[in-house]
Image (spheres, rainbow, N blue to C red):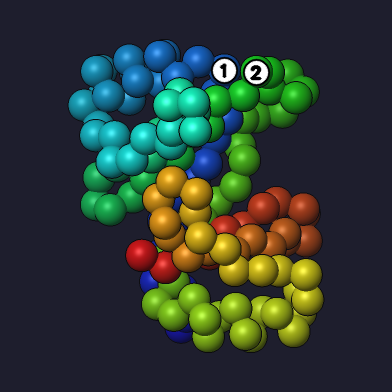
Amino acid sequence: MEIKKLSHVCLSTKNLEKVRDFYINILKFKIVHEFINKNKETYGYFINVGNNSFIEFFLVEKIENSNLSSFRHLCFEVYNIDNLYKRLKKKFPKIKIKIGKTDGIKQFFVKDFENNIIEFHQR
């Protein structure tokens, strides 16, 4: 099997302060990475929720449709991203491996049959 584990679920938020208050102050989880733009503004958190499982939050001005959830994508950590990329490239020819802007992690994305975004990365 190429998939190691579910790495994280990514959600949108309109308020990072409330994310910090609930997940860090109340639930006592730890922020392991802050996403900071070139203007030195935080626009997201990567939060360890235990047992090497994570929730990722990114700041958005509004949730596009109030009837939908804030779900953005789910991510699988893989053993060898290059091997998986080569195999999936045949089925998804437009995919490209890239390096995360602030965390430096090798990753690529595909969409499943329901159009959900699936990220694969290797730490």
Residue closer to the observer: 23 or 94: 94
Q: Quadrant of the C terminus?
A: bottom left
Residue at position x 41%, y 14% from top?
18
At label 2, which amino acid type do we have?
Answer: Glu
Q: Position of residue 28 (x, y in %)?
A: 21, 26
Q: Residue at x 64, y 85 (%)?
A: 87
Q: Amino acid at mark 1?
A: Lys
Which of the numbered marks, if any, corresponds to residue 37? none
Please tell me whether residue 114 is drawn above or below residue 96 in the rendered image: above
Q: Quadrant of residue 25?
A: top left
Q: Secondary structure at mark 2?
A: loop
Query: Mark 1–mark 2 contact, CB under 8 Å?
Result: yes
Q: Residue furthest front?
A: 39
Q: Which residue is nearer to you in this view: 73 or 67?
A: 73
Specify the farthest residue to the left. 28
Q: Earlier in the sequence, mark 1 or mark 2?
A: 1
Give how far apart the Cα atoms at labels 1 and 2 are.
6 Å
Q: Which residue was labeled with disc 1?
A: 14
Q: Residues within 10 Å of mark 1 (few under 14, many from 20)?
A: some
Q: Residue at x 78, y 70 (%)?
A: 94
Residue 54 at x, y percent in the picture:
37, 45
User: According to the image, label 2 marks what residue?
Assistant: 61
In the picture, measured across the screen, residue 100 lies left or right of residue 60, that is left
Q: Is there any visible trace of residue 47 in the rendered image?
A: no
* SS under mark 1: loop
Image check: 6 left or right of 60? left
Q: Residue at x 43, y 33 (%)?
A: 36
* Crowding near the residue tagged with mark 2, few <14, some 14–19, many ≥20 C-alpha atoms within 10 Å: few
Count of numbered circles in the view: 2
Horizontal and vertical percent for residue 13? 55, 23
The correct choice, above or below, for 109 with respect to 40 in the image is below
Camera sees residue 112: yes
